[in-house]
Amino acid sequence: MGESSGAGPAGTGTAGGDGRTGAATGTMTRRALLVGVGAAGGAGAMFAAMGALGLAPDAQDRAFAPPQGSDFSLQGRGAAKIVVLGAGVAGLTCAYELGKAGYDCTVLEASDRVGGRSLTLRGGDRLAELGGQTQTAGFGEGTYFNAGPGRIAPWMLTMDYCRELGVPLEVFVNNNASAYIYTRGMTAPVRARTARADMYGYVAELLAKAADAGALDRRLTGEDRERLLEFLRRFGDIGQDLAYRGSDRRGFTTYPGSAEGVPLAGPSSLAEVLSAGTGRAITMDFGVEQAMPMFQPVGGMDAIVTALARAVGEDRIVTGAPVTRITNLPDGVEVTHPGGVVRADYCVAALPPHLLARLPHNLGTEVTAALRTPVPVAAGKIGLEYGRRWWETEDRIYGGITETDLDITHIWYPSHGYHTRSGLIVGYYNTGAEAEVYGALPHRDRLRRALTQGKKIHGEKYRAELRSSVSVAWHRRPYVEGGWVRWPSHDGGFALLRRPAGRVYFAGDWLTRLVAWQAGAMESAREAVTAIHRRALAEPPT
C-alpha cells in the first residue's frame, strides 16, 4: 500500500496525440490543450477538462491531487460552500484539503473539543460517558494518556500529514523482547524473547526431523531439504542432531558483562509450551499494520488534530453543535443544529455511521439501511500513572507491549520520557466482550479489576505504587458510541456509501479497509474531497 501526497497527478497520457500542436493545420492536440489548462488553472482544472473529454482516470488509479485556488481561475468564479459534520480526523482532513482551494468550509462538532476518537488526556481534562459518569484526570505535569489512537505505521498516510503539518514524531516501540507474555496456561509470566525462542525452537525441531526422516520428500528435492535444515537450525537454534534444548536466546538470569552470563534454565517441555497458548501473543506484530518501526507524535497523538484544526482555522470550527437534521436540496444542503441552520452547496458527513443512521434526513431508505449495516465495536483503555518508572528500573522494559489472554489483553509501556521520574502505562486495551464488561463497571471497579489482573504479571508494585488513573469506554462515549465499526461484508451498503447521496458525501475510516486507523479516515477524506472538487468544477456556478 502506498500513498502519495504529491500535488500533481500520476500521469497525463491521452489516447492519440503526441503532445505537439499541428503546425500544418493550426490545430492543437488534446494533450497540449490539457497541459496548457493545467499550467494556467492547476491540477483540478486539468482534471475537469480531462473529464469533459472523457479522459479522466478513476480516482483509484492516480495519486491524490490537492485542490488549489487556481483550479477555479479559468471559470471566473469562487469555490463552493461546504459544511463538514464532525471534527474528527476525517472531517478535519476534508476541511483542510478543501481549504487549499478556497472552499468556504464550516465544521460542526457535537462535543466541546476537536479530534473525535483521537483523544489525548492530560491533567485536569474531564471525560464524560453515557449514563452520567464523569472522570477528571489527575495526571501530573507532562503526563498524557492517548485514550484513542496510539501508534502509526510508517507506510500510512498519517505520516505524510505529520510531515506536511510539521508534527514532530518519535519511535513507538511496538515489539520489545523484554516485555512479558502471560497466559492462563502459564504458572508465571515469561519474557517475550523466552516464549518466542521456545516456540520457534520446538517448531524448528519438529519440521527439521520430519524433513530429515523423508516425510516431506514429495515436496522437497535433496538440495531443498538441506537448505531447509540449514534454515531451521538457525531459525530455532537447534543442534546438529535437530533437537531443541534451549539457548541464550531465551534470556539470562545474569546478563554477560565482565564475566560470562548465566542463561535461563530450561526450556519448558514441548507440551508446556503448546499448552501455554502463546500463538496470538508472539505473532501480534506480524501484520503490516503492526510491524516495526512504528511512530507517535511527540507530546501526544492529539498533536495531529491540533495541527489540522489550526490549518483549517479555528473560526471555521463550531464545537458544541450536534447535528439534528440533514436536508438534501436540489441546489444545496441544509444542516440543522441547536445554534441554527447552515446552508451549503455540499456536505461531508464524517460521523460514525450508526449515529448518522439515527439522524432525521431525506437521504433515502437505502442510505439509512446502509448506515445501519456496520456494527459498532466496543473498545476500552485505562491509563495508569505511577510516580516511579519501576518497569524500567526493575523490569528493564523500555517501551513495548506485554501480551496476555487475561481480559486486559495488553499492557503498554511508554515509548518516551525514559529515565524521568514518573510515567503512564496503558493498563488495558481491550475490545469486544471484554471491553463491554469493563465499560459496564464504574471507573473505580474498572481500576480495581485492571490492577488485580496486572498484578499477576508485575506483582504488588503494580497496585501499591499507583498515583492516578483514567479509563475510557468508547462505546459509552457521547457522539461516538464505539471504538470503530465492523462490516459484515463489503458488498451493498459499503459501496453505496462511497458514493454521494445527492449533495451529501460520506467520509471516515469506516469507508476504507483501514478501519480503526487514522490513515483510513485520511484516505476516505481524500476520496470525498476529490469527488466534491471534480463535481464543483464541472457544475455551472450558482
Image (tube, helix red, strand yellow):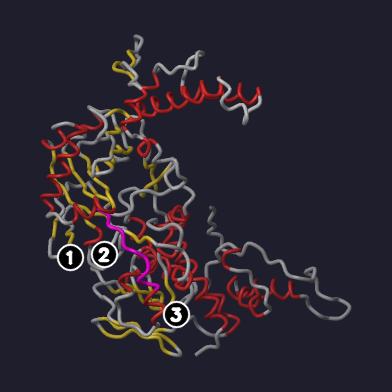
Q: Secondary structure at mark 2?
A: loop
Q: Which mark is residue 130?
A: 1
First in residue order: circle 2 vs circle 3: 2
Q: Residue at x 31, y 39 (%)?
A: 401
Left or right: residue 433 versus residue 326 is left
Q: Position of residue 521 (x, y in %)?
A: 41, 62
Q: In terms of image quadrants, where is residue 398?
A: top left
Q: Which residue is under mark 2?
A: 481
Segment tinted magenta in the rendering? 370-380
What's the residue type where badge 3 is placed? Answer: Ala
Q: Can you say whether 107 is above or below 7 in the image?
A: below
Q: Position of residue 198 (x, y in %)?
A: 38, 25
Q: In terms of image quadrants, where is residue 412?
A: top left
Q: Residues within 10 Å of mark 2 (few under 14, many from 20)?
A: many
First in residue order: circle 1 vs circle 2: 1
Q: CA distance from mark 1 to mark 3?
A: 30 Å
Q: Which mark is residue 501?
A: 3
Left or right: residue 130 versus residue 185 is left
Q: CA distance from mark 2 to mark 3?
A: 24 Å
